[in-house]
Image (tube, helix red, strand yellow):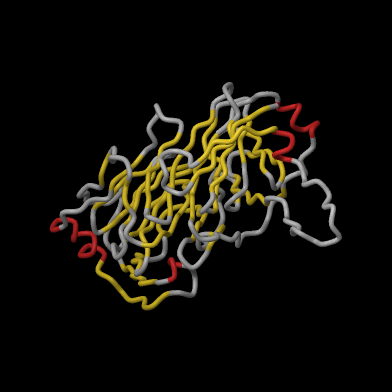
Amino acid sequence: MRVVEDIIALGSAEPLQSVVRDEHLLLSPPHPPKVPVKLWGEHPPLSVVHYPQEYQDLPYAPPRGVYENDEVRVEWQILEGRQPFYHRNCDVDEISYQIAGERALMTELGVLDHRPGDFSRIPRGVAHDNYCVADSHLLFYIPAPVSELVPGTRESQTRFPAFPGWRAGEANEAITQCMGSVGHDITVFPADEEQLLGHVHGARRRIQLLRPDPGQATTWLYGTDRIRLGHVRVAPGGERRYRRTLDADEIQYQAHGRRTLLTQRGVVDLEPGDFVRIPLGIAHASAATEAGAYLSLLSHRELPQIAETSRIADTYTPERLATLGAEVCS
């Protein structure tokens, strides 16, 4: 089947080039070389990391790292109640995506309630804590400053008590570098919780809550000159179109629905709670029979997986492709 491949660069509004392809050839291994010299390497199939989306009643644990380089870290977290300290980042803005449950983000810039599908960004240097009910969320630590690319739908508010039943008590504040990962604390000390949250009274800034545009297939929400974070909707029907990003790794997180990811590193079925990394320069497309959505994080630097692999992609076969027909591409 003939398909179109869009060759794109990070941050570009239009493809650099669009190429008509034979889909079978695009996904197949190369023809055997005709010279007795090894001309190309062997590459592993894509690997998938999975964490359940629903809250699990487990003892407190720090967020689980999923992908990390020296600039960006992606984490998954579940939480009930409070975290053990207020946190202040030295080097990064901290972006969250609410998967499940409810979460009150408590900061020096006000309190902001989160429901599933909500995004928010905590600027570098702003102290924050969470109060959670059956919570599951993602965290993206990205070098500051990060820009919001769409208007906010709500913003943090001055609210005391911060949540029902809240009373100021003993609290610690942790200052961290290296994206807040365990072992990178600079100092931890007692803090006056009421005084800390009271800083909102003199603050002009507020935390903005973002949601993707329901009328757009792709909404880019946050960005720097080296990173983009967005939300992509997938719907059955339509043309399957491939993308090849020349200058960025892409991390995809399956938020809703199920789809099949076709790539030059294998074919894999994705379900809610799955993460997958597509290296730069690899053509890929999606096929789906149901509506769904995924998050897309583009990183100009390689973003290695640090979590354990849950499963790997299958080797491409024409028979597998035939079962997908002409289902949607994204």
Q: Position of residue 237 (x, y in %)?
A: 58, 21
Outermost residue on the left side: it is 202
State the residue in front, 133 or 254: 254
Task: Please indicate whether residue 17 sits to the left or right of residue 116 in the image.
Answer: right
Looking at the image, which residue is at 54% across and 42% down? 7
Q: Position of residue 46 (x, y in %)?
A: 68, 50
On the image, which quarter does residue 271 sit in?
A: top right
Q: Residue at x 36, y 68 (%)?
A: 91
Q: Whole-percent x and y of residue 184?
A: 45, 74
Q: Is residue 143 left or right of residue 326?
A: left
Please identify the quarter of the rendering in which residue 204 is found.
bottom left
Which residue does the image show at 18% across and 61% down from the upper left? 199
Position of 271 relative to 103 (above/below): above
Q: Is residue 315 left or right of residue 210?
A: right
Between 190 and 11, the residue placed more toward the observer is 11
Please identify the quadrant where the N terminus is shown: top right
Q: Nearer the viewer, residue 142 or 133?
A: 142
Q: Taking 99 as reference, is 23 above or below it? A: above
The C terminus, quarter of image = top right
Measuring from the top left, give residue 190's x and y in whole percent.
31, 74
Farthest top residue? 237
Indicate the quadrant where residue 42 lies: bottom right
